[in-house]
Image (cartoon, rainbow, N blue to C red):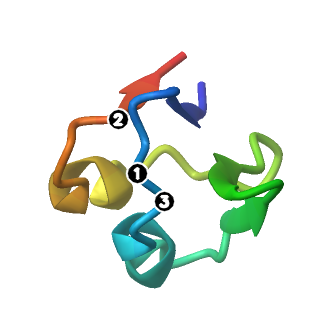
Amino acid sequence: MAHFITDVCTNCGACEDECPVGAISEADGKRVIDADTCTDCGACVEVCPVDAIEAR
């Protein structure tokens, strides 16, 4: 299972800096998580200031 960034995201970039495997990037003005790269560690969830990341 990977994590997913919801529409609540403010595109602050905190999650991208925290991801140990580089699964998060910016696309079309928002952050996205590459499900194939995500290791489901949850580091991004811990630093998101608006709780925009959830497991799917």
Marks 3 and 1 close (CB-CB < 8 Å): yes
Task: Please tell me which residue is depicted at 16% across the width and 54% down the height of the picture.
Answer: 49
Q: Residue 52 carries which label?
A: 2
The image position of residue 52, as x and y in percent, is 35, 35
Amino acid type of the residue tagged 2 in the rendering: Ala
Specify whether 14 is left or right of 39: left
The image position of residue 37, as x and y in percent, is 76, 56
SS type, badge 3: loop
Marks 2 and 1 close (CB-CB < 8 Å): yes
Task: Please tell me which residue is depicted at 48% across the width and 59% down the height of the picture.
Answer: 11
Amino acid type of the residue tagged 3 in the rendering: Asn
Pick the residue in front: 5 or 41.
5
Query: Is 10 placed above or below 55 here?
Result: below
Q: Residues within 10 Å of mark 2 (few under 14, many from 20)?
A: some
Task: Please tell me which residue is depicted at 43% across the width and 42% down the height of the picture.
Answer: 9
Quadrant in which the C terminus is drawn:
top right
Specify whether 54 is left or right of 22: left
For disc 3, the marked residue is 11
Measure how far apart labels 3 and 2 are at the Cα level.
Answer: 10 Å
Query: Is 5 placed above or below 26 here?
Result: above
The image position of residue 23, as x and y in percent, is 68, 64
Amino acid type of the residue tagged 1 in the rendering: Thr
Q: Residues within 10 Å of mark 1 (few under 14, many from 20)?
A: some
SS type, badge 1: loop
Pick the residue in front: 38 or 16.
16
